[in-house]
Image (cartoon, grey):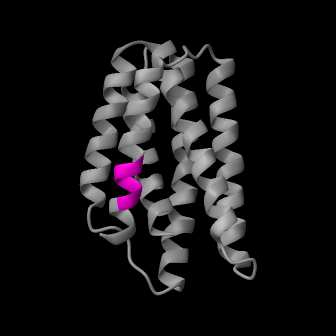
Amino acid sequence: MRVNHVGEVCAQALYEAQALTARSPQLRAQMRRAAQEETDHLAWTAQRLQALGDRPSLLNPLWYAGAYALGSVAARMGDAVSLGFVVETERQVEAHLNSHLEELPPQDAKSRAIVTQMRDDEIEHGSKAQSMGAAAMPLPVKMAMRAMAKVMTTTAYYI
């Protein structure tokens, strides 16, 4: 659950940075709506961590800063690129959450409910970004995003 919490910390940063620098008011509003939903996810994962007797990642400030920087860069490249970044991010998050659902014990209904709702919301964020005119991310960008996510998830699991 700590890894999922870190993902929500990063989502906050990404959406806030993208909302701040979005060129169109429509995109700014959409990014803020998505950020609000991610706030719910952040609260759910924090509460679940506490209930499980665990703690958030000690590197959360670093994760937030890095994600904010990435969101700012994507947004400065234009709304279509910013939306494309959201689409690819949410695709990768969906895959992560699906794998997490496979690993969670069937009897952990609370964690399963949280992860399932998060996954469904992330799918919706990606679909909305796609419908708003997302540009496709080039393969090297997708691969770099996947590699950064792997570093984050592996590190956050332990620290």
Say which residue appears at 41% left-offset and 57% top-offset.
Answer: 153
Position of 93 relative to 88 (above/below): below
Figure quadrant of the C terminus: bottom left
Q: Which residue is painted at 38% across and 23% down in the image? A: 74
Q: Position of residue 61 (x, y in %)?
A: 26, 56
- Which residue shows up at 57% across the image and 19% down it? 26
Q: Looking at the image, how many numbered discs can be counted on the residues?
A: 0
Q: Residue at x 53, y 22 (%)?
A: 83
Q: Is residue 101 left or right of residue 96?
A: right
Q: Position of residue 125 (x, y in %)?
A: 63, 36
Query: Is residue 13 something that shows in the picture?
Result: no
Vertical comparison of 153 with 121: above or below = below
Foreground residue among 20 and 56: 56
In this rendered view, identify the residue nearer to me: 21 or 89: 89
Say if residue 43 shows up in the picture. yes
Image quadrant in which you'd find residue 76: top left
Highlighted magenta segment, given as a residue range: 150-154
Magenta: main secondary structure:
helix
- Against 79, residue 107 (above or below) is below
Whether residue 151 appears in magenta in the rendering, the answer is yes
Quarter residue 73 falls in: top left
| 70 and 144: which is toward the camera | 144
Q: Position of residue 100 (x, y in %)?
A: 61, 62
